[in-house]
Protein backbone atom coordinates (compact mmCIF):
# COMPACT_ATOMS: atom_id res chain seq x y z
CA UNK A 1 0.00 0.00 0.00
CA UNK A 2 2.83 2.41 0.81
CA UNK A 3 4.40 1.65 -2.56
CA UNK A 4 1.16 2.74 -4.23
CA UNK A 5 1.26 6.09 -2.44
CA UNK A 6 4.93 6.58 -3.30
CA UNK A 7 4.13 6.08 -6.97
CA UNK A 8 1.21 8.51 -6.76
CA UNK A 9 3.46 11.52 -6.20
CA UNK A 10 3.80 14.09 -3.46
CA UNK A 11 0.91 16.29 -4.64
CA UNK A 12 -1.61 13.45 -4.63
CA UNK A 13 -0.48 12.15 -1.25
CA UNK A 14 -0.76 15.63 0.25
CA UNK A 15 -4.21 16.09 -1.32
CA UNK A 16 -5.41 12.85 0.27
CA UNK A 17 -3.78 13.83 3.57
CA UNK A 18 -5.49 17.23 3.59
CA UNK A 19 -8.80 15.68 2.63
CA UNK A 20 -8.53 13.18 5.49
CA UNK A 21 -7.72 15.92 8.00
CA UNK A 22 -10.69 17.97 6.81
CA UNK A 23 -13.03 14.95 6.83
CA UNK A 24 -12.01 13.93 10.33
CA UNK A 25 -12.24 17.51 11.65
CA UNK A 26 -15.72 18.05 10.19
CA UNK A 27 -16.97 14.75 11.60
CA UNK A 28 -15.35 15.48 14.95
CA UNK A 29 -17.15 18.83 14.99
CA UNK A 30 -20.47 17.26 13.98
CA UNK A 31 -20.28 14.58 16.67
CA UNK A 32 -19.51 17.22 19.28
CA UNK A 33 -19.28 16.07 22.89
CA UNK A 34 -20.79 12.63 22.22
CA UNK A 35 -17.48 10.99 21.27
CA UNK A 36 -13.91 11.86 20.37
CA UNK A 37 -12.45 11.06 16.96
CA UNK A 38 -8.97 12.09 18.07
CA UNK A 39 -7.44 8.70 17.36
CA UNK A 40 -8.29 9.04 13.66
CA UNK A 41 -5.95 12.04 13.27
CA UNK A 42 -3.10 9.51 13.33
CA UNK A 43 -4.03 8.25 9.85
CA UNK A 44 -3.32 11.47 7.92
CA UNK A 45 -0.14 12.03 9.93
CA UNK A 46 1.15 8.59 8.96
CA UNK A 47 0.18 9.14 5.35
CA UNK A 48 1.73 12.60 5.21
CA UNK A 49 4.95 11.36 6.80
CA UNK A 50 5.56 9.29 3.66
CA UNK A 51 6.32 12.41 1.61
CA UNK A 52 6.95 15.19 4.15
CA UNK A 53 10.25 16.18 5.72
CA UNK A 54 10.58 15.72 9.50
CA UNK A 55 9.88 19.42 10.17
CA UNK A 56 6.80 19.34 7.93
CA UNK A 57 5.59 16.18 9.66
CA UNK A 58 5.91 17.95 13.02
CA UNK A 59 3.87 20.88 11.66
CA UNK A 60 1.17 18.47 10.45
CA UNK A 61 1.18 16.72 13.82
CA UNK A 62 0.79 20.06 15.63
CA UNK A 63 -2.12 21.01 13.36
CA UNK A 64 -3.84 17.68 13.96
CA UNK A 65 -3.14 17.97 17.68
CA UNK A 66 -4.70 21.44 17.73
CA UNK A 67 -7.82 20.16 15.94
CA UNK A 68 -8.07 17.22 18.34
CA UNK A 69 -7.88 19.47 21.37
CA UNK A 70 -10.35 21.94 19.85
CA UNK A 71 -13.01 19.28 19.29
CA UNK A 72 -12.15 17.03 22.25
CA UNK A 73 -14.62 16.09 24.93
CA UNK A 74 -14.17 18.43 27.91
CA UNK A 75 -12.95 16.76 31.08
CA UNK A 76 -15.13 16.60 34.15
CA UNK A 77 -12.55 17.82 36.68
Image (cartoon, rainbow, N blue to C red):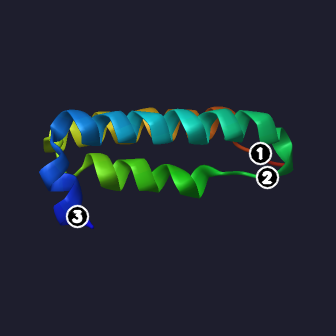
Which of the 4 image quadrants contains residue 5? bottom left
Looking at the image, residue 53 sits to the left or right of residue 42; the answer is left
Tag on residue 2? 3
Q: Which residue is situated farthest in the bottom direction here?
A: 1
How many circles with numbers are drawn on the protein? 3
Precedes in sequence: disc 2 or disc 3: 3
The percent position of residue 61, horizontal first and vertical second, equals: 37, 42
The percent position of residue 34, horizontal first and vertical second, equals: 86, 49
Q: CA distance from mark 2 to mark 3?
A: 30 Å
Q: Which residue is mark 2?
A: 35
Q: Residue sitting at 27 percent across and 42 percent down?
A: 13
Q: Nearer the viewer, residue 74 or 42?
A: 42
The percent position of residue 55, horizontal first and vertical second, equals: 18, 37
Q: Nearer the viewer, mark 2 or mark 1?
A: 2
Precedes in sequence: disc 3 or disc 1: 3
Q: Which residue is mark 1?
A: 73
Helix, strand or loop for disc 2:
loop
Q: Nearer the viewer, mark 2 or mark 3?
A: 3
Please determine whether, in this image, residue 7 is positioned above or below residue 61. below
Precedes in sequence: disc 2 or disc 1: 2
Q: Quadrant of the N terminus?
A: bottom left
Looking at the image, residue 60 sits to the left or right of residue 41; the answer is left
Amino acid sequence: MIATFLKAGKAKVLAVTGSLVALIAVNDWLIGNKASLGVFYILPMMLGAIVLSPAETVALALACSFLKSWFDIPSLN
